[in-house]
Amino acid sequence: MYEVNRSVIIVVPQEPFWNWLNNLPNSDMSELTLEDLQDDANSYLIPACENADEVWDEVESRVEEIFAAELADWCDDDSEWPDLHPDIFREWFDVVLSSIVTDLSSEPLEREAFETIEI
């Protein structure tokens, strides 16, 4: 077991995001619910932070990047996206944070490129 030199945020979708997702052209969300998305929300590793205030500072400094990643996960046509304003992000997502990440696996960490989900 090892402490990883990162902190983590979990970006949990809320009703406004769900409404946007359901209104995308050619969107078929019949197999998913908002609760499904909330139960398996995206996590983001960020630089190691000493406390929750530092984590929030990191989120605030990267809110547009995080917002774009959440939208791009479902729609790669950014003309369908809302304005990437922090106030909209806060309406569309809750953020859960932890300044400490512990790796319980003995396997090495691997990285893979981001890929858009086809809906």
Image: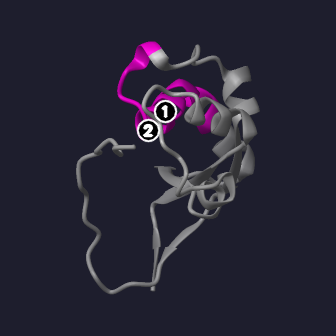
In the image, 58 versus 81, the foreground residue is 81
Residue 38 placement (x, y as % from top left): 65, 56
Residue 80 placement (x, y as % from top left): 48, 18
Query: How many numbered marks, from 0 up?
Result: 2
Q: Which residues are magenta?
A: 57-79
Q: Which residue is mark 1?
A: 71
Residue 60 placement (x, y as % from top left): 64, 30
Q: Amino acid at mark 1?
A: Leu
Position of the C terminus by quadrant: top left
Q: Which residue is mark 2?
A: 74
User: Horizontally, is 62 left or right of 38 in the view?
Assistant: left
Q: Amino acid at mark 2?
A: Trp
Q: Is residue 45 visible?
A: yes
Which quarter of the figure has residue 86? top right
Q: Is residue 95 above or below residue 65?
A: below
Q: Is residue 57 visible?
A: no
User: Horizontally, is 114 left or right of 18 in the view?
Assistant: left
In the image, 115 versus 109, the foreground residue is 115
